[in-house]
Image (cartoon, rainbow, N blue to C red):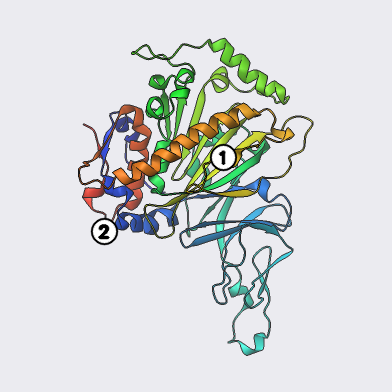
Amino acid sequence: MRTFPSAASERAARGGFLPPRRFHAQEFFELEKERLWPNVWHLVGRAAEIPDPGDWVTYDLHDLSVVAIRQVDHSVRAFHNVCPHRGNRLVDGHGHGDRLTCGFHCWVFELDGKLVGVPEQDGLPSFSRQDRGLRPLHAEVVSGFVFAHPGASPEPIASWLGDVTAELDLYRFEDMACFLRRRLELSCNWKTCLDAFQEVYHVRGVHPQLVPGLRTTQSTFGFFGAHSMMMNPNGEESARGTGSEDDPDMHLAFRRSKAERGSIDVSHLEESRLTANYQYHLFPNVTFNTHATGCQLFRFLPHPSEPERCTVDVWFLERICAGHSPTGEAEVVDVDLARTTFGESLDGFEPPESAKSFGTDLVEIYATALDQDFTLVSNLQRGLRSPGLGDLVLSAQERRIVHWHAMLDAFLEGPAFDDAWRLRFAE
């Protein structure tokens, strides 16, 4: 089990300093590739994407390619998505089959990874089929999400997630359907984008339309090992007297009415879960913006070779309204931000009837806010290379950024990790 910096969350509350080279140096990028990604649990997808035996879904990050497969006994197993014959990738995206067949030389594998078919095996060197099956990864389903770990002896997922599991379980993700998926290509480091989703200090400057709806100066924070949470009350109340204090009863009635629209039971949620905004970070690269009946999930993926490019997966999820069956998990839609915007990709989109409690109002709110964020981060990345820029200064409101970068440093420790790249806590 990895040891994280002691009292990191308490020290993070004082703020800190980050060298900007962490966000563009090739050497730092390579250290992440070597020491971070092979040693963490990856969120591969949702169990609902593979409901039936023979269903599979893939996940790719750097050299790692994973295929998660629903087994005959309805368990989920994960394998390296590569044929052990000549290294061909077996499958892409998602699909279904009784077996997996390599498209190069037609080697055939059962759903449990066993090699069962080798054309013209007599012409090959002697080998045991048992030794040439698909290589498994550790896989677990938690809160309706499929996780996989490429390491030989990883920390158990229950220990890795710790108390954050109880937080996620409150929202019953396993009862949700993903009704919208977008995959965005951005011109920034994956951490540059992730960090914009770790604080609301930027709301006044980037999202002025949200100021009346969030008390950004009254955020509270929780830390769960490497993971974290931020709670933002509704209704801005700042020392500068801007914004307005909204009636909390009105917020409560609004949220309850959305749940009632879909006949969704939210009686197990305390009032703040209905009226406030809870946002979670699962180390290292996933965030959830939760509300009473659903969430917006963001998965930040580095580019295979370029530190200043990344991919962001955006998923909208909602609990299935009473009397409806899910329409199936939404297909991924690629969005070229050089040609269009996230919001424009949603023109004419309406949630399906099974997710009507989400409502078109939330779709429009998030479309506007995310367009503002994605415009910001590409411009921000250019500034991180400025010769006139010193270490980045992080405030108490940005303590989650300080905390998670301290966790990242714990993974990168070792030879070739330059002290000049290290996060510094404020004194």
Residue toward you, 339 or 279:
339
Quote the CA–CA distance across marks 1 and 2.
Answer: 46 Å
Position of residue 203 measured from the top left corner of the image (x, y, whole percent) = 41, 27
Residue 1 screen position, x and y as percent: 42, 49
Q: Number of numbered discs present? A: 2
For this view, does 117 lie left or right of residue 59?
right
Q: Amino acid at mark 2?
A: Pro
Please name the residue that numbered disc 2 is placed on.
415
Residue at 59%, 15% in the rendered image:
252
In front: mark 1 or mark 2?
1
**Residue 372 location, quadrant:** top left
Kind of residue sitting beneath label 1: Glu
- The residue sitting at 55% across, 19% down in the picture is 275
Assign the C terminus to one quadrant of the image. Answer: top left
Residue 150: horizontal and vertical position, in percent?
Answer: 49, 58
- The residue that disc 1 covers is 344
Q: Residue furthest front?
A: 339
Q: Residue at x 50, y 48 (%)?
A: 339
